[in-house]
Amino acid sequence: MGHEDCLSLRQVEGMMTQAPQFEHRDNGLLVRAPAKINLSLLIAGKRADGFHELETVMAKIDLRDELLIKHGQKGGIELLCRGRHWAPQGRDNLVYRAAEEVFSLCGRDHNVRLTLTKRIPAGSGLGGASSDAAATLIGLNEYLGLGLSLAQLADIAARLGSDVAFFLHGPLALCKGRGENIAEIRTHFPFTALLILPDANVSTKKVYANYRHDADLYRRLSQQIGAHLAENRVDLVARMCANMLSGSCFGLFQELGGLKDTVESLGVGSVCLSGSGSALFCLISQSGSGQIGIRPEEIASKTGCQCIVVRNNEW
């Protein structure tokens, strides 16, 4: 993407206000589904079930998809996807499967029309599909008055995907296991970040398959992050820019490693990988003030990437 695709700071501020998660609209319920960034991501090792054991501090940001829930007229679940970014259709979409799981748990059918507007790119490490699924769970529960408990929704979330449970909590949490074991971090951590979105869809499966574990590095990073969290210093965790999947991702997608070097050479500070990639970010303020020394448009023109300013989400 080129310079013309970049949003100015003023445009972003107008789009990404701290709106509520739920809004009644057009006789339906609009649910906002925020993206996330990984302030840290450690791999403790590989589990007996073949998955990797994670320790990750995740923070919601105010880049969001939107899900509009309305009563349907065609019977069953009707899913419409729109927006600038691609999303799978039907049962390939976690929104559809989340709705199926909810109705299966309730033991009854519902006619719903789900309109998903995608602003979070797929394969970016920003958790868009997981957040959409969580928005479906809480949105249907609210809109249809199903009375499902958080524990029931979390059980469905764990079956749908590793990051889905996080989006039922937050806005800041330490997640362990496959990502489904959530410990909310109560400290308020306002920040502004520069988000760099290359035109690349990274396969999480391939990044994990290419990962080579470093037990010593894990122990050092885990002890350091644990000490910071014990003192409620999330800012120091974020400053570490620790993502143990970075080497695997950059090994598979060398252009992303080059992009990180290019952006850092522009004087924005440390650039971090979110999740398994492809999105990169750097914290430019830990007060949420949004004061930056280089315009997003400049970075976009030098890298060919979409570049936007985001802030921490408040819910």
Image: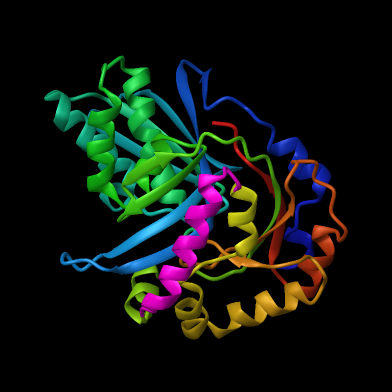
Whether residue 239 is visible here, answered yes or no, is: yes
Span highlighted in magenta in the image: 213-233
x 61%, y 35%: residue:
188
Q: Quadrant of residue 3?
A: bottom right
Determine whether 100 is above or below 210 in the image. Answer: above
Q: Report the residue at 45% width, 62% height from top.
A: 222
Q: Main secondary structure of the magenta part?
A: helix
Instruction: Work out whether 98 lies above or below 305.
Output: above
Q: In what quadrant of the picture does the N terminus appear?
A: bottom right
Q: Position of residue 242 (x, y in %)?
A: 54, 66
For this rendering, which residue is in front, 60 or 78?
Answer: 60
* Residue 23 vs residue 221, the one in the foreground: 221
Q: Does the magenta stretch include residue 232?
A: yes
In the rendered view, would you say 288 is above or below 144?
below
Q: In this view, does 7 lie to the left or right of 234?
A: right
x then y, percent, for residue 244 = 46, 71
Q: Is residue 275 visible?
A: no
